[in-house]
Amino acid sequence: QVGDTRVAEFRRGSGQPLRELLHVEQPEENHNGGQLAFGPDGRLYLGLGDGGGGFDPDANGQDGSVLLGKLVATPADGPPDWQIVVTGLRNPWRFWFDPALGEVWIGDVGQDAVEEIDRVLLEFDEPPKNLGWSAFEGTERIEGHDLNTEGELVWPVATYRHGTGHCSVTGGVVYGGAALPALGRRYVYGDFCSGALWTLRGTPEGGAEDVRREEAVVPQLTHIGTDADGELVFASAAGDLYRAVPAGS
């Protein structure tokens, strides 16, 4: 067992799990994903990486019979019944739901060259949509890796290349707070290695526009979230928490 992924249910105030909801064997120590969140349909969602190793050696991302390299969900009540919602992921490092539009935004970590942001419309009566890994890194074709054609191929809405310290995307949220009006309804994301932050504006057609680099930097950025008022909060692997405030305040 190398870094296996387990999901368990606990009762608040108790250190003992009530039941195990999922156990996925991980062949490597990296690309384990691991974020949990409740979706707009009330189900519990889990992001799982492809199992690790360079260029997905077991082709898990495009294999519809395994959970690795997928966004999966199970009903919150009753026995667990994990279903694949999105395929073709390398390592989804943070996803966020926009319940008003029925969408999920995903930051998917690249291999050697390209980091990507995906915006996926949740259509539960359709086959799972495919983000392309490992047949594609971003929009770049990887020779020798087959593409599963069962679900719609969805291209990233934004990418950036490695260089100037960039190496690993951290997905974020669409800002809905009041303290930073210049960021209103913009998706915020960043890079772990450089600490750089970007924002973009989603289009009504499901794409993105006006990608811009922001001035703020968060070293070792691991998470972007919001507080109870919808204001941005950032977590660093160095153990620090940061709050976004207007310039000059």
Image (tube, helix red, strand yellow):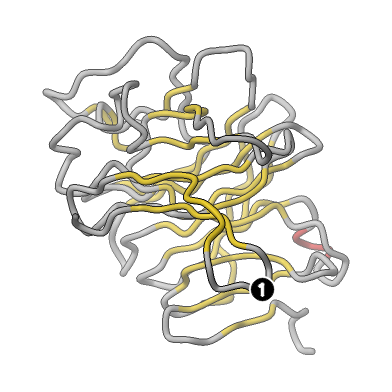
Q: Position of residue 236 (x, y in %)?
A: 48, 78
* Rendered view: 73 above or below 125: below
Q: Tell me the residue at 25%/45% (across/down).
A: 51
Q: How many marks?
A: 1
Q: Tell me the residue at 57%/55% (across/down).
A: 9
* Rendered view: 244 above or below 4: below
User: Where is the N terminus found, in terms of image quarters?
Assistant: bottom left
Q: Position of residue 231 (x, y in %)?
A: 77, 69
In the rendered image, which residue does mark 1 sit on? 233
Q: Quadrant of residue 162?
A: bottom left
Front residue of 23/49: it is 23
Q: Which residue, as the protein is rendered here, is positioned at the far right?
A: 178
Front residue of 215/121: it is 121
Q: Position of residue 53 (x, y in %)?
A: 15, 48
Q: Position of residue 186 (x, y in %)?
A: 71, 52
Specify few, some or many for label 1: CA neighbours under 10 Å numbering under 14, 14-19, or 20 or more: some
Identify which amino acid the numbered label 1 is placed on. Val
Q: Tell me the residue at 19%/38% (across/down).
A: 56
* Rendered view: 75 above or below 6: above
Lateral position of residue 27 relative to residue 40, left or right: left
Lateral position of residue 29 relative to residue 202, left or right: left
Front residue of 192/186: it is 192
